[in-house]
Amino acid sequence: MSDRGVRFVLKPIVFVASLGPFFYLVWAADTGNLSANPLADLTNETGVWTLRFICITLAITPLRKLTGWNPLVKFRRMSGLFAFFYGTLHLTTYAIVDRFAGLDQAAGWVEALSLGHAPGGALIASTLRSLAKSIGEDIYKRPFITVGFTAWLSMLPLAITSTAGWIRRLGGKRWNRLHRLVYLTGILGPLHYWWLVKADVSRPLTYAAVVAALLGVRLFWNRARRAPAPARASATPA
Amino acid sequence: MLIKRAADIRSSEITDKKLYLNRREFLGTSAATVGAVAAGALGAEALLQAATPAPHGRKLDNVKKSALSVDEKPNKWEDITTYNNYYEFGIDKDSPSMLARNYKTEPWTVAIEGECAKKGNMPLEDILKGQTLEERIYRHRCVEAWSMVIPWVGFPLADLIKKCEPTSKAKYIEFTTAYDMKQMPGLRSPVLRWPYVEGLRMDEAMHPLTIMVVGLYGEVLPNQDGAPLRLAVPWKYGFKHVKSIAKIKFVEKQPLNTWQESAPQEYGFYANVNPSVDHPRWTQSTERRIGEFLRRKTLMFNGYGDQVASLYTGMDLRRNY
């Protein structure tokens, strides 16, 4: 496929497809097509899609090497940003349905909104204080929340510095080094999932296995490359 | 300290079929077109294979109202029959609604064993003989921090216990769920040690709130809710409510219930609803009532404290979780 074909045809298609799960969830929630506990579904599905996009992002470089099809790299930033997009939706859903909905102030919001007026300034201020406290305590108290929040945090600088301007500003070498953080995201994501499930670890295990394979293949290639010429240093994040 | 007997092949050595199928499916998708396009379609497909509420069953006759019912609005039939934890029919909430559809519950006999005079197989008809059915609208609180209000139909477990004539050695009662590899696809996955076992102390079992359930909303109990016979103990977490009961055994020692065996630091024998004792990984102080947005404060003994707190006088409920 030509460069133009990738840029003007394939990329937009992939972009729209990546938004598919989001629009599906909005549609399903709106039409009552989720389970009896739709709020839990929204939390779970956004989380799972974050993991999928993390795996996709990590798969791009190995796939490019295996197939030799270099335009694949043009999808790396996009899928990374989609991981951040779904991760942020996941975090927001958790903050609203798990934390906010448990606050004493939440009833006041529901009442105000159902009457059609905006919540007062005092209510907003006290809600934000309580919400920050509630989330903070949860992050501190529960290891799987600590890990999940750290995973989201690890994506934040990567999303911010994903622009061409930031690559220029940081310089390729430093930018590359920073973006190795995605390996941490890849490890923390499945761990977060693993820690949350009750008994059946097969799904978290699937993601863990995929990430392990994708990181393992990098280690293997790095070694293979280093073996014949140990002096050559390479800083390209694979 | 309990020393477990090792099975011939340890369950850890067996790769669960679902697991390798999942893995294959996953690798397949991620390889295809960098995943995104295919994954979008696949995820939607998985979600679209929708849960199906139970078809309405036979109406039960002469169901009496009960003073032990709560005065709260019951959850919808659709909620109660599509959102089930019933791992024998899969681990997803909606899988029992799809996989238990053709489960055969007739004829049904319950094996009565252990410290009692009337050992043997008791047909369900005999269990129900002379029994007045009552509607009991109970709060139901899952250990996963969601809850429902459910209009069960059943009768006091105490009545069934009396029929079995337990001896003075019967200190506990142990329930075992049916174990049918042909009909219960979830059994192929070693997520728990099968068959599912639960238990109660004799005084808990004899308590008037403790019932054997055979119906829902005045109709025969749907398969996904534990037909033909399940337990309801409304002051305890949902996992105590053992489903599709095939065996009842009177025992002297406290039974080892399945979830306790699976994760003893997270699930105990008593499993009384207790907002002040958190699950190690999540809070039990609030719950989401299915169908509501705001989380409710969880009540001690699920709000049945007046009736049952005396069963636990002098017990440290933090240790006996």
Image (cartoon, coloured by chain):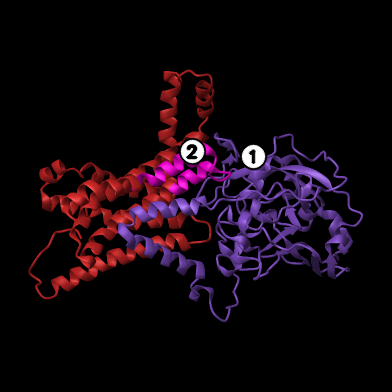
Chain colours: A red, B purple
Q: Nearer the viewer, residue B71 or B41?
A: B41
Q: Which residue is mark 2?
A: A97
Q: Is residue A160 left or right of residue B79?
A: left
Mark 2 or 1, closer to the camera: 2
Where disc 2 sits, the SS reads helix
For disc 1, the chain is: B
Labels 2, 1: one chain: no
Q: CA distance from mark 2 to mark 1?
A: 20 Å
Q: Chain of mark 2?
A: A
Q: Are marks 2 and 1 in contact (CB under 8 Å)?
A: no
Tell me if residue B115 can be seen.
Answer: yes
Find residue A123 and report its horizontal and vertical position in percent. 45, 22
Residue B94 magenta-drawn? no
Mark 2, residues whose alpha carbon is within 10 Å: few (<14), some, or many (≥20)? Answer: some
- How would you classify the magenta stretch by its main secondary structure? helix
Q: Which region is colored magenta?
A: A18-45
Image spot of residue B193 (x, y percent):
60, 68
The mark total stands at 2
Corner quadrant of residue A127: top left
Which residue: 31% across, 53% down?
A: A185
> Viewed as shown, does residue A108 lie left or right of A90?
right
- Residue B301 seen in this snapshot: no
- Name the residue type under label 2: Val
Query: Which residue has dot 1 on it?
Result: B299
Q: Residue at x 57, y 40 (%)?
A: B288
- In which image quadrant can residue A26 be found? top left
In the rendered image of this protein, does residue A65 appear above or below residue A73?
A: below
User: At numbered mark 1, what does the secondary structure look like: helix, strand or loop?
Assistant: loop
